[in-house]
Amino acid sequence: MSTAPGKSYRIGITMVDLFKMFPDDKTAEKWFESRIWKDGRRCPRCGNDDTVTGRHPRMSYYCHECDRYFSVKIGTVMESSKISYQKWAIATYLFATNLKGVSSMKLHRDLGITQKSAWFMVHRLRESWRKLAGVDQMEGPVEIDEAFFGGREGNKHADKKGTSKKTAVVGAKDRNTNRITASPVPETTKARLEHFIDGHVRQDAKKYTDENPSYSGLTNHESVRHSVGEYVRGMAHTNGMESFWAIMKRGYDGTFHHISEEHLHRYVNEFAGRHNIRTMDTMDMMNTVAENMAGSRLTYRRLVSHV
Ligand SMILES: [Zn+2]
């Protein structure tokens, strides 16, 4: 184990450590089982714990209640995936530790899987990060801010189809817990922003925003006037959210060529989720990510139909 750069108190894992931890597929499968079935092995279909080890080539267990084989992949984002446990474990590591995000091209090259499998895999991983990015009812003080993604210049064809417009993302950061949640919105109207704020921020929490008139009328609210060069006035600033957007934009420009609007919410989850676990030791990060794979599913059909 080595010390992660930048934070001397956080314990990192090198690639060498990683391959010692997951020397083969069986070890990786056991690790996923230990995280996803923390309270003991249960059939993911019926919840029964009367299960035995079976002889199925891909599914290690058999449920007497359902009369069916199962594996730890069932009921998680890994369900129906032919990609090995070892590769899923390595992908989990790459996702947790790459601050700028992981592109499907990187997984394609690093894991030796097809581009299509890699593309499906990154979206499945992002889907499972939804819970890490979810924050209910922040107590504050809270910074609320919005940013715009996409709509690259020079894409004339996309322009004509009307797909190059920028998509707004609104986010909130609780200064007390340092947690961030964010979500794409179709427009930055007062109604849309208030809907987001109502869902994530307690009404009595102190709220800081910029001077966007859509925020006017919020309770316990202070704003800074960016338009006249005011960025900080005492505690009134949105610097925490702005540095989050900067990291997300660096990932967007550096790692990804374009995230289409219909997949942007998963990308937002990935970045907010990574922010929320960033102070953990790498092993705790990986454990948390694996635990959150349960109860999330994303089928290929749903992914390509943009639901
Ligand atoms: Zn069962």
Image (cartoon, rainbow, N blue to C red):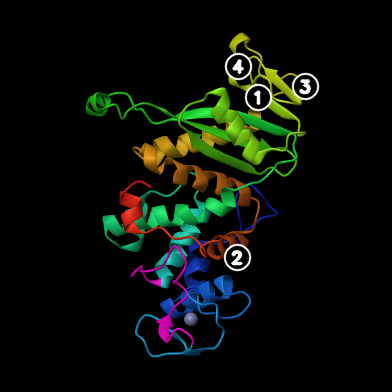
Q: Earlier in the sequence, mark 2 or mark 3?
A: 2
Residues at discs 4 and 2 in contact (Cβ within 8 Å): no
Q: CA distance from mark 2 to mark 1?
A: 41 Å
Q: Is residue 24 visible?
A: no
Above-or-below relation of 18 to 156? below
Element assignment for label 2:
loop
> At numbered mark 4, what does the secondary structure look like: helix, strand or loop?
helix
Q: How many other residues sit within 10 Å of disc 3, few (<14), some (14-19) or many (≥20)? A: few
Q: Which residue is mark 4?
A: 213
Q: Within 8 Å of ligand 1, the CB of disc 3?
A: no
Report the amino acid beneath label 1: Thr
- The residue under label 2 is 1
- What kind of residue is marked 3? Gly
Nearer the observer: mark 2 or 3; the answer is: 3
Residue 256, x across and y down, in percent: 37, 41
Residue behind mark 3: 234
203 over 295 or under it: above or below: above
Counting other residues with Cα less than 10 Å from the Cα at mark 2, is it few (<14), some (14-19), or many (20 or more)?
A: few
Q: State which mark lies toward you, 2 or 1.
A: 1
Amino acid type, residue under disc 2 in the picture: Met
Q: Nearer the viewer, mark 4 or mark 2?
A: 4
Q: Nearer the viewer, mark 3 or mark 1?
A: 1
What's the distance in space between the residues labelled 1 and 4, CA to CA? Answer: 10 Å
Tell me the residue that label 1 is attached to.
Answer: 209
- Which secondary structure lies at badge 3? loop
Q: Which residues are magenta?
A: 65-84
Q: Are dots 2 and 1 in contact, CB under 8 Å?
A: no
* Of residues 99 and 263, the one drawn nearer to the viewer in this rendering: 263
Amino acid type at mark 4 = Pro
